[in-house]
Amino acid sequence: MMAMTAAAVLSACADGTIEQNTWDSQQGQIIGGELPDEPMHAAVVSLHQRADDSWSTSIFCSGTLIAERVVLTAAHCLDMGTRRTVVPVPPEKLAIYVGDNPTTDPNPVAYFVSEALIHPLYDKIQIRNDIALIRLVQAPGVTPVPALPQSLGLTSSDEGATINFAGFGQDEYNHYDQKLQVDGILEEIYTDQQIYYAQLDGGPCFGDSGGPAFIKRGQVPYVAGITSYGDATCSQYGVSTRPDAFQGWIDEFVGGSNEPICTADGWCNPECAPDADVDCGTQEPSCGNGVCDGFGEDCDSCPADCGEIIHIRHGRVACCGNGICERRERNACSIDCN
């Protein structure tokens, strides 16, 4: 599966999420898929390019929230290198959308990334160890679906079992960006770290890379596969990476620091203690004090202080009526900039 890119500019909020202001999709779902219909599908997320406080609504890969702030995806989704070199994408270049369609969502929100880790043994030539993990700065409040543990790991007895694929990639009409899901059959435990499935009646395609193949143990869903690659027409076969083969590596990452990120990263994290985040200054957030001060508040969350929301170029917003003439407002907010 290949990562796909496009350009549509959006802007960030003071709480560490990024909300859409404008978009212009020029893109790329599961072949033969249907809309999400189970709670587990809410944990399926999409990966987006980010530039400073803006992000592209066009997806380039999919993933699954497997812990409160951890996304499981494919290594090739985070690789910016050439054919033989692996160059991980910097965390500040990533945004994670939680929802069903970032291009039609009336209020799409994406989340900043504090860490992005490609498996150290990822082999892009042989397509082995195609697994990666992403840590979000802030928990999106969605119920995670855990990776399948070794204790419940796949065996030959699972061959023939139903698995459910989900992702935001290309559908049979060459449309992208809508989260879809479809059932498939686990044909073969392909290797000690991969599963194989036929795709004659539907399955993952471009943009679904990194997305899940769900399996249920009892009635509990787990991520049993990470979409890795398939045939060029998405109509014959596909291969997914098995998370159960990487439990130790996943557990080590998931068990890492869950403390809020309070470093100087350009935004005020409301989960940080007072004075802990230098981006918050020395004051606690105060909505309703008549000052649009940016300490945890913005145009959307504190209209009483920040006045009217004006959309200006490049997807950015101005808070008109707060009595402050900001440089970017000079041509948009005459009430502040007389």
Image: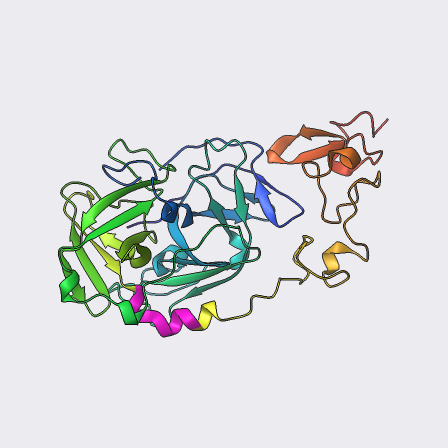
Q: Nearer the viewer, residue 79 or 199?
A: 199
Side (left or right) of 227 relative to 295? left
Please tell me whether residue 303 is drawn above or below residue 13 in the rendered image: above
Please tell me whether residue 302 is drawn above or below residue 131 in the rendered image: above
| Whole-percent x, y for residue 180 in the image | 32, 39
Q: Quadrant of residue 18?
A: top right
Q: Nearer the viewer, residue 146 or 14?
A: 146
Quadrant (top left/top right/bottom left/bottom right) for the C terminus: top right
Q: Is residue 44 visible?
A: no
- Residue beneath the point at 16% across and 46% down: 199
- Residue 246 colored magenta? yes
Q: Residue at the front extreme?
A: 218
- Residue beneath the point at 30% across and 67% down: 244
| Whole-percent x, y for residue 158 in the image | 17, 61
| Segment tinted magenta in the rendering | 243-251
- Residue beneath the point at 72% across and 62% down: 273
| Whole-percent x, y for residue 291 in the image | 83, 40
Q: Quadrant of residue 85?
A: bottom left
| Whole-percent x, y for residue 137 in the image | 57, 57
Side (left or right) of 20 relative to 192? right
Q: Nearer the viewer, residue 99 or 78?
A: 99
- Residue beneath the point at 38% across and 46% down: 39
- Residue 92 colored magenta? no
Q: How many marks?
A: 0
